[in-house]
Image (cartoon, grey):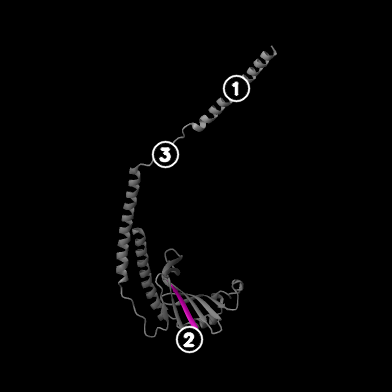
Amino acid sequence: MAFGWCIRRSASSLASVCGRVARAQAVSVVGNRSFLAPKPSSFLLRPFVSRGFLFSTATDQLKSDQTLLQVIDSEINDAFEADLVEETRASDDFPFRIEDKPGHRAVTLSREYHGEQIKVEVSMPGLDMCDTEDDENEGRDVKQSETSIPLLVTVTKKSGLSLEFSCTAFSDEIVIDGLSVNNPDNSSSEGQLAYDGPDFQELDENMRKSFYKFLETRGIKASVTDYMYEYMTKKDSREYLRWLNNLKNFIQE
């Protein structure tokens, strides 16, 4: 009887263990269903772009580029015709050497004068607004535009000490806008804090006249600036034509 009781207890324990194993397997199967479920294709998630849309975009770009090239070609023809105008040669007494680098918007004039090094940086022509007489009808000042070229004149002594003049050359006169003394011994930080002197127009009239004579004896005079105005006008046309050709090459690539 005791032996039968042991057999029944063992059978009951075995059934209990088998039940727990079966439940664990069922939970495992349910948990793995999400892993085994098929994933949505990444292709289905991509935005749809039709071939017709891509072709239309490429066609529009081609048309716009062709239109732009036609406009550029027309401008090149006009600029080329303007560039055919014969350039005036400098007179024999023109005292400066001209350094003109293609692609730059300024040229440099240089010469030596009694041991001094004279350098003039000449920029492209521009328009300046100048005052004229009062308008008879309105009773107010009238502004008119006048072409001019900016000049930066540097006169350097053997010691390295230099005078720098900021000037504007008009058709009938040269105007000194500013004057500064540059000492090569000053560091860059000291140079920024250095006293540049008073406004040129505030100087004594005799001193201002003397500085104009100072520049004239070194070659900064009307005959030189008149020629440089024509030269820079011609250079402006050449640089514009160069720029147009570079632009055309970019569009064609």
In which quadrant is the C terminus drawn?
Answer: bottom left
Tag 1: Cα neighbours inside 10 Å, few (<14), some, or many (≥20)? few
Give the CA separation, mark 1 to mark 3: 46 Å
The answer to whether residue 24 is magenta is no
Give the CA separation, mark 2 to mark 1: 115 Å
Q: Which amino acid does label 3 sit on?
A: Phe
Give the CA separation, mark 2 to mark 3: 80 Å
Residue 176 place in picture, x, y as percent: 50, 76
Q: What residue type is labelled 2?
A: Tyr
Residue 188 place in picture, x, y as percent: 59, 72
Q: Name the residue under label 3.
A: 43
Please report whichever mark, 2 or 1, sits nearer to the chain's N-terminal start: 1
Q: Mark 2 points at which residue?
A: 113
Give the extent of the magenta segment.
117-123
Q: Is residue 247 above or below residue 106?
A: above
Labels 2 and 3 touching (C-beta < 8 A): no
In which quadrant is the N terminus drawn?
Answer: top right
Q: Nearer the viewer, mark 2 or mark 1?
A: 1
| Nearer to the camera, 44 or 148 | 44
| Magenta span: chief secondary structure | strand
Q: Which of marks 2 and 3 is in front?
A: 3
Residue shown at 35% from the left, 46% from the top: 54
Residue 115 place in picture, x, y as percent: 50, 87
Instruction: Look at the numbered disc 2 and give the secondary structure of its residue.
Output: strand
Residue shown at 38% from the left, 75% from the top: 231
Q: Mark 1 points at which residue?
A: 18
